Image (tube, rainbow, N blue to C red):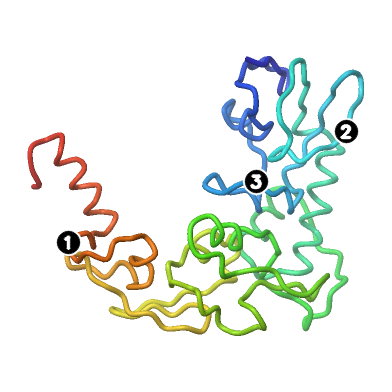
Amino acid sequence: MVTITINGKELTVAPGTTVLEAARSLGVEIPTLCHHAGLSPEGSCRLCMVEVEQRGRRRLVASCMFPVAEGLIVETETEPVARARRFVLGLLLDRSPHAEEIADLARRYGAVGFGRLPEGERDSCIHCGRCVRACEEEATGCLAFGFRGWERKVGGPYEEPPSACIGCGACAKVCPTGHIVMEESEDRRLIWGRTFELLRCSLCGEPFATEEQLEFLGEEDEKERICERCRKRVFAASFTGGLR
């Protein structure tokens, strides 16, 4: 085990734990955008910066990527940390001023935009990479970043609807700004310029997944086509003696 100090409180955690994970186990709030508990860390947004002291040296690090070490001292609310957060949020406000998540964080941490981008260059995508990682780790990996700098964007090859997309919606669910739009009607799901037919749960009858999604998961048998809510009921019933 490793003993560290966060905001004056001593804490013992397992080796390999990140500073962000350790801080949150203490109830210490550190803002994040690119981080998602269900995805591998990337450290691209730099909003989770904290100040650490190690062997007498102080520096700012991305807490979602930085592993704990014996004797590490962490401060999450110093003035250098506050300046770094305001700077990052100021840039994000310029790019995505209408994104509710960005606006909320900016109000919370006292950030204002720099006014550097004209209206035509604004975009609700903040390049956090959550959608790309979700697609790589949970689906077919059909999404990727293209172009560079402010022209960088997420999508399929050659800016065409990704042919390998299974319509699972994982990318939309993890997007922090709502940039990826997924629309659903009773039996249809529209995402990335493609329309998918929604299949119904064999138990409750509610539409819940696409044919392509279930084939990818290896659940092609109609009896296995069960929504998450019913899966939980079936699992619970295995301990209680039957569905109710």
Badge 1: few (under 14), some or many (20 or more) residues near its Cα, within 10 Å? few
User: Left or right: 125 with respect to 198?
Assistant: right
Q: Nearer the viewer, residue 105 or 194?
A: 194
Q: Which residue is mark 3?
A: 41
Q: Where is residue 102 shown, x and y percent of the image?
A: 67, 59
On screen, residue 69 above or below 36:
above
Q: Where is residue 63 shown, x and y percent of the image?
A: 72, 37
Q: Residue at x 51, y 66 (%)?
A: 172
What kind of element bears circle 3? loop
Q: Which residue is mark 1?
A: 223
**Residue type, mark 2 in image:** Arg
**Residue type, mark 1 in image:** Lys
The residue furthest right is 57
Q: Nearer the viewer, residue 138 or 177?
A: 138
Q: Which residue is mark 2?
A: 59
The residues bearing labels 3 and 2 have C-alpha atoms spaced at a distance of 20 Å
**Residue type, mark 3 in image:** Pro
Sequence-wise first label, 1 or 2: 2
Q: Where is residue 183 shown, x and y percent of the image?
A: 43, 77
Sequence-wise first label, 3 or 2: 3
Sequence-wise first label, 3 or 1: 3
Q: Residue at x 28, y 78 (%)?
A: 186
User: Left or right: 39 with respect to 224?
Assistant: right
On screen, residue 117 above or below 171:
below
What kind of element bears circle 1? helix
What kind of element bears circle 2? strand
